[in-house]
Image: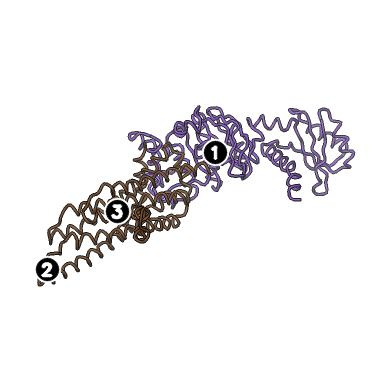
Amino acid sequence: MIEVERLTKHYGPVTAIRDVSFAVAPGEIVGFLGPNGAGKSTTMRILSCFMPASSGTAKVAGFDVFRDSMAVRQRIGYLPENVPLYSEMRVASYLDFVAEVKGVGRTLRRSRVADVMERCRIDDVQHRLIGKLSKGYRQRVGLAQAIVNDPAVLILDEPTIGLDPQQITEIRALIKSLAGDHTVILSTHILPEVSMVCSGVIIINRGSIVAQGAIDRLVEDFFPTARVHVQVAAPPAAVREGLGKIPGVVGVHEDPASDGLASYVVESARGRDVRGEIFQLAAQQGWQLRELRRAGMTLEEVFIRIVAGEETAAEPAIVEAES
Amino acid sequence: MKIWPIFKKEMRLYFTSPVAWVIITMFLFIAGYFFYSIFAFYTLASMQSAMNPQMARELNVTDSVLRPLFSNVSVILLLLMPLITMRLFAEERRSGTIELLLTFPVRDGAVLIGKYLAALTLYAIMLALTLLYPGIVLYFARVEWGPLLTGYLGLLLMGATFLAVGIFASSVTENQIVAAITTFGTLLILWVVGWSAEYVGGPWGRVLSHLSILEHFDTFARGVLDTKDVIFYLDVTLVALFLTLRSLETRRWKG
């Protein structure tokens, strides 16, 4: 549904994104993840036909965003980052305006507008001025204008930023309910959000894509081994030797000590749980076992690894440039 | 072309905010004051001329009431028109709504025309309301319809030109005040440029006097309908609108 190939955008001498390529299948919800300033908004602005790329191509719903801009615009709903709305308009008449501009026919318009207001739960404020609404309501009005023409593709730039936890849950549920009929690409820098809402993820850092794919696959790729955290009060050398002898264990690393007790990360083949053996070992040796838990191999860790890894790799270059 | 929804939206924004109301009120108030003082002076003059037949021969409503009224109104327009157009693009840029507007399935041209027509309609409403003043004259004296019509046509064309210059200024900045001042400055220069035509003389003098907005309006106020003047206003309007369209496109490229 969305195909992006070698997309590059320069703002004067600054390169916002470089050689970005990815694809999103129909009906999928994909999270576009990256630290602030990584190029998320730039990519979304190109996809939504707000501005052209410097080079590369992007296709949305089969149409080129540059050459068939009108065809693309008819098929997308876009929510920009800071939710720009006309503060002097009333909610219902604003949505009616958007529906009309997006080509929803006069007869259908009233029911479409009423429908999206109900779905986004803004029907109780429909006669209020948008400028007088709270942040949460504004966000929902923004989402409502994006879906008012029932577009095939939704491009949402940070849809939950600045909301309270209750509202975040609601918006997420709303976005999730759009999957299947709509293809959604949403950007965020909140990691749990991606695991909660999206099926796939694209990680971007410093203008380039560093990882993409289904979330489970990505985690597996990055962490080929299962890991267990062990904290035990015992002589470190003996612990390391004992843990290393457990069948299936491929590595034991010492974590920086906390509370004066050494902790270890035990890596084993994926799918093999070594916690039982560790417990028995500790019991046999009379070690005091303080903690024994599986390390969560989450998207968060993948992300931190990727982004942090890039940063350390890039550091020497910066130092050189300064000296 | 989806001009209509854009037009409706702009009209709604004009009238839900106090902008349109304040501009219309101030315009009618100032124009009304000018009308009153001109008319009062005319009454005084006609009373004096009752004793002086020589003077009475030169006195007529068109020259003594309508013509000065039209040129006074055109000065008010110079001040008020920039205020009508300043928000059209500048505010959309400042608040970021332009990002949504330009990703809706509407061409830039339709957005521009919708906005321009909304400004023009607001202006036409203002102008139509001033028809009250010639209406009052009609009650007391005979009015020549020709000069009245050309006068209003001239005001309409001149206002349309002002609005086009204003919308261009609004499209190049995100600050409404900058847009208004730029418009006012440009219009004022186009207004007074004819004054120096006399001293410059020669072909340049003719160019300068041709560029003068004021000079082209004067023929309308005198009751003369000259295609040269009509074309001048239409020309400037189209050039300004074309430049606006280009500025919208350029801004898109620069991001």
Q: Secondary structure at mark 3?
A: helix
Q: Residues within 10 Å of mark 3 (few under 14, many from 20)?
A: many
Label 3, on which residue? B216
Tell me if label 1 and label 2 are in contact, CB under 8 Å.
no
Q: Position of residue A206 (x, y in %)?
A: 65, 41
| Visual hue assigned to chain A | purple
The reply to whether residue B255 is in sight is: no
Which amino acid type is marked by label 1?
A: Met
Q: B88 or A155: which is nearer to us?
A: B88
Q: B50 or B54: which is nearer to us?
A: B54
Q: Residues within 10 Å of mark 1 (few under 14, many from 20)?
A: many
Q: Real-space Cα distance between discs 3 and 1? A: 49 Å
Label 1, on which residue? A44
Horizontal relation, residue B234 to residue A8: left or right:
left
**Residue A40: quadrant of the picture:** top right
Q: What is the chain identity of the residue bearing mark 3?
A: B
Q: Position of residue B158 (x, y in %)?
A: 31, 52
Q: Position of residue B134 (x, y in %)?
A: 19, 58
Q: Secondary structure at mark 2?
A: helix
> Residue at (37%, 48%) from the top-left corner?
A127
Which amino acid type is marked by label 2?
A: Gln
Q: Among all residues in the image, which is located at the extreme front?
A: B202
Label 2, on which residue? B54
Say the numbered circle drawn on residue A216. none
The reply to whether residue A81 is in sight is: yes
Q: Real-space Cα distance between discs 2 and 3? A: 32 Å
Q: What is the chain identity of the residue bearing mark 1?
A: A
